[in-house]
Amino acid sequence: MLDQFLSTTAVFFTTKPLGMNHRILFSICCMLVFNGCSNNESQDVGSTYPYLKLNGKYVYVDANRKQVVPGEYDEAMPFRNGVAGVSVNKQAFYINKEGKNIFGTTFQKVKVFKDGVGRVKINDRWGGINKDGHLILKTEWEELESFSEGVAAVMRNGKWGYIGKDGKLLIEPQFDKADDFKNGIARVNNGSASFYISKDGKCWKE
């Protein structure tokens, strides 16, 4: 794929300025390459069918610009394990590869379905649903980041803390900034102070 991309871009950069059709094809080639180089979790419809904005709407297409997932969307996200988040007329929901609203309901907003959790916004608060569409994380957070190592950063009253997949608070919201956990630790900030924290709440400076 990379060789095809390089040969294609070589043609683009050695000929006359790109027309609209060539710019569209070039954009698709870029998305295919970068999706193909991403982690295994992204090796699904999103890596084969990038979403492309045409006439103000997003559609899922193949390398020949043929639409392969039904529907036109105001917002579109990558597919993960056969599921993608989209939005139409300010109503957000999750679709499958047939373009069907798989849970039969809509939300204020949704985020990429990742690690078995779909983050959804209801009444200005974020929570999470599972692959069956059941609410597993109460919609009580101002912000809810994706899970990493079984832990997700959450915001309450403008401060960040962490919860587990059961929704229980592991670390009370108290930080101005909170990164994802990697190898058992996460970087957090309070003002200009930056330090690391473990899942049991122990902190130490960088």
Image (cartoon, grey):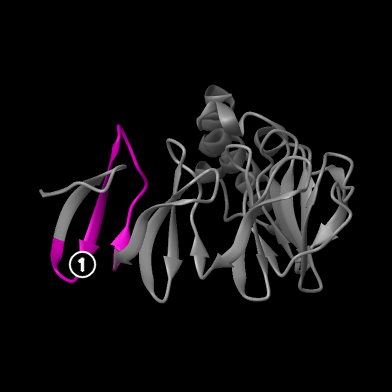
Is 183 a magenta residue? yes
Q: Can residue 6 be seen from the camera position used here? A: yes
Q: Place residue 41 in its image quadrant.
A: top right
Q: Tell me the residue that label 1 is attached to.
A: 190
* Residue 31 coordinates in the image, percent (x, y): 59, 42
Magenta stretch: give its range: 176-193
Q: Looking at the image, which residue is at 62% across and 49% down?
A: 112
Is 32 a magenta residue? no
Name of the residue lying farthest toward the front: 168
When the figure is inspected, residue 119 is found, relative to residue 198, above or below; the finding is below
Q: Looking at the image, which residue is at 41% across and 76% down?
A: 157
* Residue 172 coordinates in the image, percent (x, y): 35, 60
Q: Secondary structure at mark 1?
A: strand
Q: Place residue 173 in its image quadrant.
A: bottom left
Question: In what quadrant of the picture does the N terminus appear?
Answer: top right
Crowding near the residue tagged with mark 1, few <14, some 14–19, many ≥20 C-alpha atoms within 10 Å: some
Q: Place residue 107 in its image quadrant.
A: bottom right
* Residue 25 coordinates in the image, percent (x, y): 68, 45
Amino acid tagged 1: Asn
